[in-house]
Amino acid sequence: MPKSAAKSAAKSAAVIELPDAPKPWTKEKPKGLYVCSEPLSKGARLDTWRFFHPTNSLPEGAVDDKTGKPRSELGEFPWYQRFKRFPKTAHHNGWHSGHYRGEEGMAKLQEDLPVLHATAMEALEMVKAAVPDEAALEGFLPESIAVMRHKRGWGLGRHFDNAHPVGKGAVLMLTFSTAFYECRVFKFSCPPLGLEYPVETTDGQVIFFTGEAYDLWAHESLHNEKQSGEVISLSIRMTDVCGYMATPGASPYKPGAPAAKKVAHERIAFKLKAKAAEAAEAAEAAEAAEAAKKAKARGGPSGLEGQVVGLQDASGRHYLADAKTWAPLPASGDKRPRSE
């Protein structure tokens, strides 16, 4: 490889951040994104909403139909500030279940958080029924439940989830909402490729994303002052994929969104390089074929004389491109097929 080419390849391999493609971007659904056509059951939606809204602004003296206790005694849900580096302005919009690993963890989750366990398992069965051949669903369990609350005008900026080996990252995302007229929009985007895919998240919606949708595409919750109600979003993952309280050594990559972006852009750069090489090869082949066609039309050599092309019959004969006939393969050391 020439020094200039080697230097260029090394520079490409060292890419950390690719520039965004010019807008407008093309709307295209990422590979590995699945949106279930039907919502969760009404019971799951109501139970989950009540879990995050224990008082729910009910009249004084209202009684919880499950515990028999006055709803006022249950208190408000313990939301915390997801982005604590802005303590004076950050919304109280986050909550995390903690980690529940494996089947033993599922039993503990069912004991500790029965409503969330039931809802997560119902959603998981829906996705498995919709895409039974998705490899990322094999062994998938709701070991980690991260929750974000989105009121009118709130949102979450564009980011990548923690990087993992290709195909390992996977998220089961559930939406519970009173924004019936103006939905919260969850947008996937791949800026270097100029691609985006917005999803209107409705009450009870079930989404699963993995593969390129996780590895190459970022996502965000759009800020919208016209959003007509509150949205609760659950991001359910395996413990070793979860970015909250990440397990040391669970991934060969550095945790955090900035590091994940770097990994994603390196993968995109590799994909672009492979695509460019494929296009160059196709162009070269097309150019050679066109030159041969013109030469043939002039009655001159086509450049394909004696070449054995990929057609072969039952007798082991190959097709001669120039003679437009079949001939047996040449003897060892002979450069041309023998004519009959």
Image (cartoon, rainbow, N blue to C red):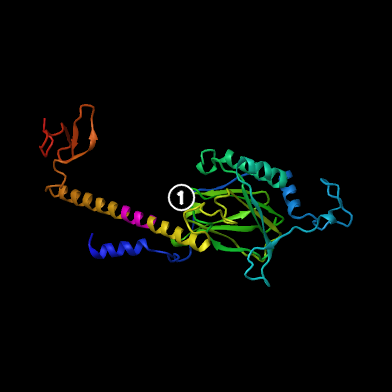
199 left or right, relative to 70: left
Residue 46 x/y as whole percent: 74, 48
| Residue 207, horizontal then vertical, whole percent | 59, 49
Quarter residue 245 falls in: bottom right
120, 239: nearer the viewer: 239
Q: Position of residue 251 (x, y in %)?
A: 49, 53
Report crowding for label 1: few under 14, some 14 to 19, many 20 or more residues within 10 A (C-alpha).
some
Quarter of the image that includes the C terminus: top left
Let me know if residue 83 appears in the view: yes
Q: Is residue 131 above or below residue 182?
A: above
Residue 205, given in percent of the width and then of the height, sits at 64, 49
Magenta-colored stretch includes residue 276:
yes
Residue 40 appears in the picture as rendered: no
Per the image, label 1 sits on a secondary structure element best described as: loop
In the rendered view, tell whether residue 163 sits above or below residue 299: below
- Identify the residue position indicated by label 1 in the image: 166
For the stretch drawn in magenta, the main secondary structure is helix
Q: Note whether 72 is above or below 126 in the view shown.
A: below
Choose top left, top right, bottom left or bottom right for residue 128.
top right
Asked whether 313 or 6 is in front, the reply is 6
Is 241 in the magenta?
Answer: no
Q: Which residues are magenta?
A: 271-278
* Amino acid at pointer 1: Val
Name the residue located 63 percent from the left edge and 47 percent from the top edge. Answer: 100
Quarter where residue 184 is shown:
bottom right
In the image, taking residue 39 as reference, residue 212 lies left or right, namely left
**Placement of 319 over or under 190, stated as above or below:** above
